[in-house]
Amino acid sequence: MRCPFCSSEDTQVKDSRQAEDNTAVRRRRLCGKCAGRFTTFERVQLRELTVVKKSGRRTPFDRDKMARSVMIAMQKRPVEPERIEQMISGVVRQLESSGNADISSDQIGELVMEGLAGLDKVAYVRYASVYKDFRATADFETFIEEENLVGPDEDHGKDKNDSFEGKI
Ligand SMILES: [Zn+2]
């Protein structure tokens, strides 16, 4: 496994343990060249998934790419990394068991949103804002109301950005 910091191939496994309810093996690795430490996960891949974009373009499904988008939404949220990993694995398992090797980016987005809804409301709204490509604050407000993320007594008269922050 190549070191993500210096690209050296001289890396060693220092520790190996079961993770995510024994569906993955987590390995701590050490680079012999730059002493960088990093973690890899080994998982069963049930089937090769292909993402079909709206344009018709096809790309292999990339778990890491999906995980990065989730991590961005989860930034500084008080949720244990293990629970986030479990959620991501859950999304992948659902995609893999959907019976179809071709999946749409919408399918991924919807499943990630479902997963985030159960983990953290702030991350959910952050992800939705990117996924649904909101362009105006008004879209956020409509969305938050539609999803019942605010109580009926909230003050709607304040500055839009302030009230958005305050509500969540
Ligand atoms: Zn290195």
Image (cartoon, rainbow, N blue to C red):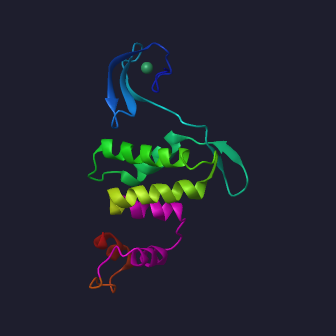
Residue 25 sits in quarter: top left
| Left or right: 98 in relation to 29 | right
Residue 38 sits in quarter: top left
| Left or right: 71 in relation to 155 | right
Q: Position of residue 20 (x, y in %)?
A: 35, 37
Q: Position of residue 59 (x, y in %)?
A: 66, 43
Q: Residue at x 43, y 43 (%)?
A: 89
Q: Main secondary structure of the magenta part?
A: helix
**Foreground: 115 or 166?**
115
Q: Residue at x 53, y 65 (%)?
A: 132
Q: Position of residue 164 (x, y in %)?
A: 35, 73
- Answer above or below: position of 44 versus 142: above
**Foreground: 22 or 9?**
22
Q: Which residues are magenta?
A: 123-151
Quadrant of the image where one finds ligand 1: top left
Q: Residue at x 54, y 53 (%)?
A: 108
- Answer above or below: position of 162 versus 116: below
142 is within the stretch colored magenta: yes
